[in-house]
Image (tube, rainbow, N blue to C red):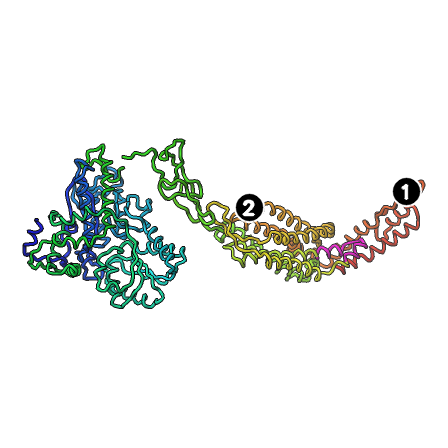
């Protein structure tokens, strides 16, 4: 009846003055004392007054735009708390409340949250900073709200400081289910994951696949859009456009964006279904403009506005088309209906929204019921002047009932009663009339086993009860992201991994041998040194072109070809480093295979030439002369390798592959494509090297200063040792250093052949110039010829006779007296004469032939 007395008094009230608030209490909407205080956050006003685009002073502005539907939500919380106080649920303990108006602004809500966290028995503006809030007693034990996810996310992060329970009745953002980031958040509604899944399923079952989406530019809108997009794609539904509106009505650009959105809808004429993740005031403004433009579509409504009675009041609202919405389950509303019937009896000294509603109703006393909502909305936007008409607003309580959203009211009732039962459990063994009886973060649990945290799973014990179990860590590459999971989930082994006891999977790092790796730098340095050696040798040979050493090496052309092959081999090692590409994978093996084959082919011809030049065996001479065709043989030997590599590229080319066998990394590597082709390439080089080794080994005892055979033999041995070692190492090595193994083998074999082929000659050219002359060369040839003729003249002849074996031996040469003397000792004058004649002929003709061939 006090409200009736107030209504009979003439007064003038300014709802939205331009002056800033005087005290923080101005934002306290409704309060009631009690032993245990429950906080509440409701957006009773839809926006804040601001004459500027952005604030210039750190002050909170006044709110305006009275929202009847949210006012009813505050009444639902008050009604639920009174139900608990009037029941036997908490005997001897009274619940109080402290409800704040968030004005649909995060900053206002956060200011209210600071007051919730203020210390008990202290100033409401005092919040102590501590490193441990276990013994800290705030004035409020738990918070109901907020409704909108954007605000709830911000508030939850603050309340987490003291692990104060926060129960939301409307916030559906999926991110709030993450207990790691929001450990003290709870809600009585499902997350958007289920709503968006139902939306996508409805659209798919209805045969629609070309739709539009409108959402808000905030955490709720973006998260809902992302979740829905995934669900839509899974149901083969395509999104034609995605329009984003400013989140709050305080944004001056909202009308411009709404007009742009409607232009987009008109332009996309083939889109007849639009999913709308907006708040009520967005939809109200959007539909007002849509009716003016005669836009008619099928609108899929989210739970935020699907049951909003305010939208029904839009003139000609049926012309916008059809609305299909999703909402929350409703409960028994009879008790709340009775509460609204007796609202005029509710004390309003500490209930500002109730006072404001009475004033708005009084200002619209002469308005018909059908126009009452519009009248209240118009008066709540600015200055309200009471007109002195006396009327008992209890006669219009049915007006509030028409604006009630049963789903939200039921959700608020569930939130309040959930806190009531939790407080009852805590107060069974405590005196909860004492505010210090418990802390907000506490739980008097009655469980057989403690809950398993994320990263663990339940392992049932021998007990027959399912409530009794042990918690064991998830094994490697498995995870659990919720409490009390029965089993751990498997990570995607190809792209993700997780350690033991993990609550999430981590993306595998991609690894390969890159230029920054110390081993790669070392190998690259060795390759550069090799290139420098090749260039230096080329310069030395060019400057000593006409010397015997260079001529005996086959001439400058052959040397240049061999040096070019060595250069390409060193260059090919660079293709084994850095991130593999299809081009580098193909190039590195082909470049090495062809260039190394050409190098071995040239050395093979050099070995054949040396053997031909210094061989005394007539049969071998004939064979070698027939075989010695340098250019055709080099061309044929190299062409065979080119054919092998070409077939390899055509039928099973090397390509980039991902090695996922390692637990925490993905190795980018070149897959050879065909092991047979890879082996054929290396095997063919090995065959050429073996033939070269045989020829060089035959001529290993030829003149030292100008003979390459011995060093070619050593070079081939180094090659064989390197590649024989490479095969088992390459087969058993894996990881990013696998290419380094092949680089090392290439460098060893390349350095071995290069050093053995050219370094001895460079030593003679640079350090023994006296031996690098024509006269010294001829002297060496004649000296070697003498020893060679002696060796040829020594023979063993076995003559079968009845009593004796005739052995003829001669250790002298070239018709000298010693040879004649030795020959006289032989049995048979005829054989002695033939020996001397052949020996003398060989000694006279051999040097000239050998010099000319060399």
What residue lies at 57% left-to-right and 51% top-to-bottom?
743
What residue lies at 79% left-to-right and 51% top-to-bottom?
788
Tell me the quadrant of the picture where the C terminus can be found. Answer: bottom right
Q: Can you tell which mark lies on residue 411?
A: none
- Is 138 drawn above or below residue 251 in the view shown? above
Q: Secondary structure at mark 1?
A: loop
Q: Is the Cβ of the residue at disc 2 closer than 8 Å to that at disc 1? A: no
Q: Main secondary structure of the magenta part?
A: helix
Tell me the residue that label 2 is attached to.
Answer: 733
Q: Is residue 854 visible?
A: no
Q: Nearer the viewer, residue 288 or 352?
A: 288
Left or right for 398, reference 225: left
> For residue 623: magenta?
yes
Q: Secondary structure at mark 2?
A: loop
Among the two numbered marks 2 and 1 on one chain, the one whose residue lies closer to the N terminus: 2
Tell me the residue that label 1 is attached to.
Answer: 805
Cα distance in 3D space between marks 2 and 1: 65 Å
- Is 417 drawn above or below residue 62 in the view shown? above
Q: Nearer the viewer, residue 146 or 346?
A: 346
> For residue 112: magenta?
no
Left or right for 497, reference 54: right
Residue bounds of the magenta highlight: 605-624
């Amino acid at each position: 009846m006090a409200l009736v007395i107030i209504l009979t008094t003439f007064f003038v009230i300014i709802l939205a003055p331009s002056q800033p608030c005087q005290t923080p209490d101005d934002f306290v909407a409704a309060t009631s004392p009690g032993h245990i205080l429950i906080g509440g956050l409701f957006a009773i006003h839809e926006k804040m007054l601001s004459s500027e685009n952005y604030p210039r002073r750190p002050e909170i502005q006044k709110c305006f735009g009275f929202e009847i539907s949210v006012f009813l939500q505050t009444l639902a919380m008050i009604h639920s708390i009174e139900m608990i106080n009037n029941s036997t649920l908490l005997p001897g303990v009274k619940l109080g409340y402290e409800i704040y108006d968030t004005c649909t602004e995060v900053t206002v809500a956060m200011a209210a949250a600071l007051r919730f966290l203020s210390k008990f028995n202290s100033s409401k503006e005092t919040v102590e900073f501590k490193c441990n809030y276990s013994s800290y007693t705030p004035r409020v034990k738990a918070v109901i709200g907020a409704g909108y996810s954007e605000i709830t996310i911000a508030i939850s992060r603050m309340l987490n400081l003291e692990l104060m329970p926060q129960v939301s009745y409307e916030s559906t953002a999926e991110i709030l289910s993450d207990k790691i980031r929001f450990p003290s958040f709870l809600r009585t509604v499902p997350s958007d994951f289920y709503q968006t899944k139902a939306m996508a399923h409805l659209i798919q079952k209805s045969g629609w696949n070309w739709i539009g989406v409108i959402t808000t530019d905030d955490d709720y809108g973006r998260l809902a859009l992302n979740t829905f997009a995934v669900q839509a794609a899974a149901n083969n539904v395509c999104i034609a456009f995605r329009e984003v509106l400013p989140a709050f009505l305080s944004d001056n650009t909202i009308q411009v964006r709404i007009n742009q959105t409607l232009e987009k809808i008109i332009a996309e004429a083939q889109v007849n279904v639009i999913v709308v993740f907006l708040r009520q005031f967005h939809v109200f403004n959007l539909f007002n403009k849509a009716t003016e433009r005669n836009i008619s579509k099928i609108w899929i409504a989210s739970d935020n506005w699907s049951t909003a009675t305010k939208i029904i009041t839009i003139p000609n609202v049926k012309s916008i088309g059809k609305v299909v919405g999703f909402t929350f389950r409703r409960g028994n509303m009879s008790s709340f209906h009775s509460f609204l019937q007796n609202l005029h009896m509710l004390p309003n000294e500490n209930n500002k929204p109730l006072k404001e509603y009475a004033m708005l109703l009084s200002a619209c006393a002469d308005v018909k019921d059908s126009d009452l909502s519009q009248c209240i909305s118009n008066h709540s936007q600015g200055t309200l002047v009471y007109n002195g008409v006396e009327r008992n607003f209890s006669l219009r309580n049915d007006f509030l009932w028409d604006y009630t959203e049963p789903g939200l009211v039921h959700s608020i009732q569930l939130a309040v009663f959930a806190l009531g039962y939790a407080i009852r459990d805590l107060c069974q063994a405590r005196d909860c009339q004492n505010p210090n009886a418990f802390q907000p973060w506490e739980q008097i649990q009655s469980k057989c086993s403690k809950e398993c945290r994320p990263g663990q799973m339940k392992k049932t014990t021998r007990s027959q009860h399912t409530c009794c179990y042990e918690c064991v860590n998830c094994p490697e590459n498995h995870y659990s992201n919720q409490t009390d999971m029965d089993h751990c989930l498997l990570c995607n082994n190809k792209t993700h991994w997780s350690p033991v006891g993990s609550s999430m999977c981590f993306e595998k790092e991609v690894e390969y041998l890159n230029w920054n790796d110390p081993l790669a730098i070392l190998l690259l340095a060795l390759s550069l040194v090799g290139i420098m050696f090749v260039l230096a040798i080329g310069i030395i040979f060019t400057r000593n072109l006409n010397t015997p050493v260079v001529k005996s090496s086959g001439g400058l052309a052959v040397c240049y070809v061999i040096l070019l092959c060595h250069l390409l081999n060193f260059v090919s090692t660079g293709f084994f480093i850095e991130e593999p590409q299809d081009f580098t994978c193909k190039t590195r093996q082909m470049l090495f295979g062809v260039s190394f084959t050409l190098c071995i082919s040239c050395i093979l011809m050099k070995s054949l030439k040396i053997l031909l030049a210094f061989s005394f065996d007539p049969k071998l001479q004939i064979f070698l002369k027939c075989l010695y065709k340098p250019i055709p043989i080099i061309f044929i030997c190299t062409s065979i390798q080119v054919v092998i590599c070409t077939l390899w590229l055509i039928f099973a080319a090397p390509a980039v592959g991902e090695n996922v066998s390692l637990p925490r990394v993905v190795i980018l590597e070149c897959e050879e494509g065909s092991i047979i082709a890879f082996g054929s390439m290396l095997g063919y080089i090995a065959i050429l090297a073996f033939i070269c080794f045989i020829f060089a080994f035959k001529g290993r005892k030829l003149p030292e200063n100008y003979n390459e055979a011995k060093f070619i033999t050593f070079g081939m041995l180094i090659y064989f040792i390197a590649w024989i070692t490479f095969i088992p190492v390459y087969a058993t090595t894996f990881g990013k250093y696998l290419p380094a193994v092949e680089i090392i083998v290439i460098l060893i074999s390349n350095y071995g052949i290069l050093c053995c082929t050219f370094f001895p000659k460079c030593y003679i050219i640079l350090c023994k110039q006296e031996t690098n002359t024509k006269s010294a060369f001829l002297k060496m040839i004649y000296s070697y010829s003498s020893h060679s003729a002696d060796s040829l003249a020594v023979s063993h002849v076995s003559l079968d006779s009845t009593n004796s074996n005739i052995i003829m031996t001669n250790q002298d040469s070239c018709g000298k007296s010693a040879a004649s003397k030795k020959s006289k000792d032989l049995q048979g004058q005829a054989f002695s004469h033939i020996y001397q004649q052949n020996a003398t002929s060989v000694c006279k003709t051999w040097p000239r032939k050998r010099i000319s061939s060399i």
